[in-house]
Image (cartoon, rainbow, N blue to C red):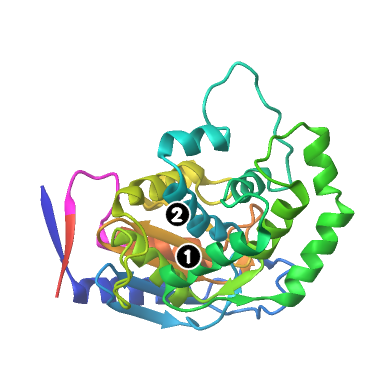
Amino acid sequence: MERKISLDDVRRAVEEAYEAVKSIKEGTIDPRNTRAKAGQFGITLTLADGTIISKGDTDVKSPMADISKVPLHSLLFTQNTPEELVKKSGMCPKDKVEKKPHGVGAHGIRAFSAVEPTGDPDSKWDLYVGRVIDLMGSAPELDDQLYESEKRRVADDKVVDTLADAGYYLYDDAAMSVDLYTRARSMAASTGQLAMMGATIAADGVNPVTGKIVYDGAITQNIVGLMAAKGPHKMNAPWLVLSGLPAKRSWGGAILGIYPGVFAIAAYAPELNAAGVSIKAARAIIEVMRRLDMSLFASARVTIVK
């Protein structure tokens, strides 16, 4: 079954969702998010052909945090088969159950440790940043103040020692991998940049504005599959039921959702709920999906017509 949705209907859904949730004043700003201002709110929806629909504070940059895993996973799926990456990520059954240290970003650290080349932090970082820029079509900003404060927190929390004490396996030097992951999470991007990154993934690895082929389109299903499996922090199951859209969130207040072949949507508002998810951004994306009556898990194949 196929469904056709007009571009005007998509614009209307974004505008109505924005108006419906803009007055929400619930939630608190994460103290690490020092550049955020209460009341900031923006939505950007970018089609797989590069058409941009935006409303509100879409140029405000916020920390990528967990969203940084999306380009990281695209890089890892470029360097590994899905089977290899599942094994490296520790997500497959094995004889010995590994104890994962909680609260230190262990999976993200392991993911950075698996990026090739081994033992070369500069090359790893250049590859990662290059992938982010190719996906976004523009450069995010490294929040130096956040990066320095997060490095101090990592040192105070003895993250490297915690990983070692737990026997948590990494594919490269622990201190280097922790630093790279910390730096990536300290990158700041706008909803416009995040939505363009998502649209490139939705377009099977071809940036719809620059035309650059960023990766083999066959891995889009793996990237989005991981987003669906992990989801926004502590709410992946209810999120998928309510939105029907694989997504990642940041404690900075952004959420990025991707509908392969159709569009990506990013929303930002710094006020978070108790789980660290932006209340307005989550509500806005759910509202857009509800008004369009769309779900990635529905049987209909959706096309946006102009």
Image x and y of residue 41, in percent: 52, 77
Q: Nearer the viewer, residue 38 or 74?
A: 74
Say left or right for 287 vs 108. left
Image x and y of residue 210, in percent: 32, 77
Please determine whether, in this image, residue 131 is positioned above or below residue 242.
below
Q: Residues within 10 Å of mark 1 (few under 14, many from 20)?
A: some
Callout 1: SS: helix
Q: Nearer the viewer, residue 189 or 18?
A: 189
Say which residue appears at 64% left-offset and 47% top-offset. Answer: 113
Magenta: main secondary structure equals loop
Rendering quarter of residue 290: bottom left
Please determine whether, in this image, residue 122 is positioned above or below residue 58.
above
Query: Which of the two discs, 1 and 2, labels the residue nearer the N terminus?
Result: 2
Say left or right for 90 vs 80. right
Q: Is residue 299 magenta?
A: yes
Rendering quarter of residue 293: bottom left
Mark 1 highlights which residue?
131
Q: Residue furthest left?
A: 1
The C terminus: image quadrant: bottom left
Image: magenta residue range: 291-301
Distance of label 1 from label 2 (alpha carbons): 8 Å
Mark 2 highlights which residue?
74
The circle on residue 141 is none
Q: Amino acid at mark 2?
A: Ser
Callout 2: SS: helix
Q: Residues within 10 Å of mark 2 (few under 14, many from 20)?
A: many
Q: Is residue 109 magenta?
A: no
Q: Pointer 1 and pointer 2: residues touching (CB < 8 Å)?
A: yes
Q: Amino acid at mark 1?
A: Arg
